[in-house]
Amino acid sequence: VPKGSLIVPSCYPALHDPEVYPNPDVFDPERWITGDAESKTKNWLVFGAGAHDCLARKYVPLTMAAMIGKAALEVDWVHHATSRSEEIRVFATLFPMDECPLVFTKRK
């Protein structure tokens, strides 16, 4: 692997393990509401576990919800669509090809 390369681990094989997720390719949101999530900690592979648990797993969603909620109340958001707004590039996650130009203005 060349120096400076970005390494992105693939969680796909583990997240499609039929021993962990029966019928892994089936959309089944009910699999998450069984009430036994605490006993199925390996289902949370994407957040790590044990000594490698993501410290921000609980903090970040709460903080982001608060920030987005506050922004929704206090600023107007305008997306300036471009000819590439509907195109995406995939690089560890999805990104709009036009970088999603937004303009925020404080509400009066």
Image (cartoon, rainbow, N blue to C red):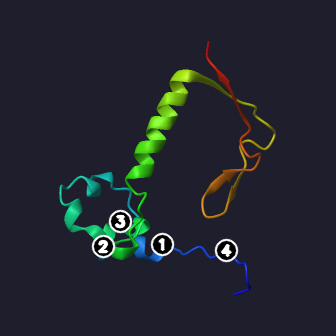
Q: Which mark is residue 104?
A: none
**Label 4 sits on residue:** 6
Q: Position of residue 69 (x, y in %)?
A: 47, 31
Mark 3 and mark 2: span between their CA atoms? 10 Å
Depicted 59 relative to depicted 21: above or below = above
Local crowd size for mark 4, using a 10 Å CA cut-off: few (<14), some (14–19), many (≥20): few
Q: Earlier in the sequence, mark 4 or mark 3?
A: 4
Mark 4 and mark 1: span between their CA atoms? 16 Å
Local crowd size for mark 1, using a 10 Å CA cut-off: few (<14), some (14–19), many (≥20): few
Q: Earlier in the sequence, mark 1 or mark 2?
A: 1
Number of marks: 4
Q: Earlier in the sequence, mark 2 or mark 4?
A: 4
**Label 3 sits on residue:** 44
Q: In the image, 58: left or right of 85?
A: left
Depicted 13 relative to depicted 65: above or below = below
Q: Earlier in the sequence, mark 1 or mark 3?
A: 1
Identify which residue is drawn at 43% across, 57% down: 56
Q: Secondary structure at mark 2?
A: loop
Residue 22 in sight from this viewpoint: no
Q: Position of residue 54 (x, y in %)?
A: 42, 65
Callout 3 amino acid? Trp
